[in-house]
Image: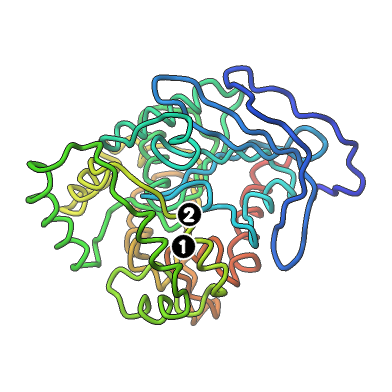
Amino acid sequence: MYDPATAAPTQPSRLPAFERLDLRRVVEHVHAGRRVELWREQLRVPGPQPLALRRLVPLTGEGRARVLLVHGLGQNRRTWRLPGRSFEAALAHAGYEVLNLELRGHGRSAQLGSRPATGLDDYLEDLRATLAPLPRPPFGVGHSLGAGMLIRAIAHGLPLAGLVHLAGVYTFASRNGFLRRVAALTERTLPPLLARDTPMPMDALGKLIAWRPRLSDRVNAHLPISGWGRRSMEPALLADRVDLGFDRMGLGVWLDLAQLARGGSIDETGAFARSQLPLLVLSGAADRLASPADARACYDASQSRDKELRVFDELLHGYAPGHIDIIVGQRAPEMVWPRITHWLDVRTTV
């Protein structure tokens, strides 16, 4: 385990393919008042659609391995980092170099001038622009659609050392009839009316939920598309997660995902399934957006000899998270984070 008390501070080496916008030594809040000191670098991935990349590095200036974090549908870097709880800081404190990517049209990537994606192929190009120049393949940790896009990246031969599929898309809405009906309705009605890069205002929904977090928590528990488990997040943290972390997305991305809801998998050619990359699949029993059935489909399809599936449920773990609280819920730091860091540790120990 990386120990900041004994680390000799050394500035991290540059990633020459990316433009450095800012570098500073910072104190990051991990969880429950625990703070750690790290290097934080803001990077710009150049290209027709510039991308924002937030890099955290241990004070030693290098990590035991590189980890790329990819957020999901209509989200941003806040999937992994909130003012009161930060999985990315926990990873960096464990000795890893962390790259937190914001896909085009999201968060700081939008501020840099990138437009909303017109479909999943645009996100694949974002991953290509980020992964191809790296000096060594990173481990990918994807949440929701971000996990699905990392599957697409692997299928297209992009360099990764392994994949953590966290509440991820493989099949989509296989156990949620309401979500399938919504997908079918939008497929029929929206394409003639709106361009594929029309921004869909997930950020407005986030602000509405954040307005009354305690009431939202009660209402969410009864929805067929509930985004988190009941009382799994403190009200203030829930408000931060949806207010800061819900973002705009291009209509075309949803339409591509809606097509997936008709059947099949995001691994269109089966190339991911044939890959031998290490695979960790994690899901929460209370997840109604990317159900344990979708996680099982990913695990079953993979032919890797190094694969693991864990569904957190009340019977075995005393813990059944939903979709977003599997990362930042009250018990995520004790239940989910250690599972991921241990899996990485085993595969990076020399």
Q: Left of 180 or right of it: where is 284?
A: right
The residue under the point 17% across, 37% down is: 195
Q: Is 6 in front, or is 208?
A: 208
Q: Are marks 1 and 2 in contact (CB under 8 Å)?
A: yes
SS at circle 1: loop
Tell me where residue 55 sits by quadrant.
top right
Mark 2 Cα shell of 10 Å, populated few (<14), some (14-19), many (≥20): many
Q: Is residue 136 above or below residue 324?
A: above
SS at circle 2: helix
Q: Is 210 in front, or is 257?
A: 210
Q: Quadrant of the C terminus?
A: top right
- Give the tally of numbered discs: 2
Q: Left of 169 or right of it: where is 244?
A: right
Q: Left of 301 or right of it: where is 23?
A: right
Residue 284 is situated, as x and y percent measured from the top left of the image, at 45, 68
- Which residue lies under the disc numbered 2? 245
Q: Is 52 in front, or is 14?
A: 52
Mark 1 Cα shell of 10 Å, populated few (<14), some (14-19), many (≥20): many
Residue 129 is situated, as x and y percent measured from the top left of the image, at 46, 24
Residue 236 is situated, as x and y percent measured from the top left of the image, at 57, 70
* Disc nearer the start of the sequence (1/2): 2
Q: Is residue 220 above or below residue 129?
A: below
Identify the disc placed on residue 155.
none
The residue under the point 55% across, 80% down is: 318
The residue under the point 18% across, 67% down is: 177
Tell me where residue 10 sits by quadrant.
top right
Residue 272 is situated, as x and y percent measured from the top left of the image, at 37, 38
